[in-house]
Image: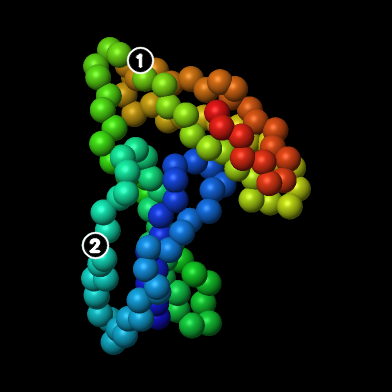
Amino acid sequence: MTVDFNVANFGIGLPFHALTRPIPVTMPAHSLKMVCITWVPPFGGLLGVEVGIQVAGQDRIYSQRVIDVGEILLPNQPSTFEFMVGNPYPFPITVTLGAIRHLPQWEVSFDPPILQLAFGRYPRW
């Protein structure tokens, strides 16, 4: 099997880019193995990180997370956050934005909340 590590700018529909070549891993049956790399983000902000596992003859499986590199949020101070939204499909799409508020006092809004994207469009919101 191989393990790959990838990163993307924060957004929706934006491509991931490889941080390393796929790393070959040999695992005996019923075993565990940790595969790691060292990577230093080139700039602060939010980044998408993806780790993929490819086993011959199987669909690739992956896990994605967003990491926050140095974003400073102050209590009771509004903060505007802009991110790219892209359309990776060969046809127009509608993107509806939503949020999960983990604490009841958090306020989140989107402007605009619904995006109509033609193929290959990468507007900045």
Instruction: Classify mark 2: helix, strand or loop.
Output: loop
Question: For the residue marked with disc 1, what is the amino acid?
Answer: Pro
**Crowd around label 2: few <14 · some 14–19 · many ≥20 (10 Å):** few
Question: Can you give x and y, in whole percent of width and height, for residue 25 in the image?
Answer: 32, 81
Cα separation, mark 2 vs mark 1, equals 34 Å
Query: Contact, CB < 8 Å: mark 2 with mark 1?
Result: no
Relative placement, left or right, of 115 versus 21 is right
Could you tell me which residue is drawn at 38 percent across and 45 percent down? Answer: 47
Locate the C terminus by quadrant: top right
Q: Nearer the viewer, mark 2 or mark 1?
A: 2
Relative placement, left or right, of 95 versus 55 is right
13 or 107: nearer the eye? 13
Residue 82 drawn above or below residue 26: above
Locate the N terminus by quadrant: bottom left
Residue 82 drawn above or below residue 54: above
Could you tell me which residue is drawn at 42 percent across and 30 percent down? Answer: 100
94 or 9: nearer the eye? 9
Relative placement, left or right, of 74 versus 9 is left
**Residue 38, disc:** 2
What residue would you read off at disc 1? 78
Could you tell me which residue is drawn at 37 percent across and 20 percent down? Answer: 79
| Disc with the residue nearer the chain's start (2 vs 1) | 2
**Residue 15, disc:** none
Relative placement, left or right, of 75 versus 94 is left
Question: Can you give x and y, in whole percent of width and height, for residue 123 in the image?
Answer: 61, 34
Instruction: Classify mark 1: helix, strand or loop.
Output: loop
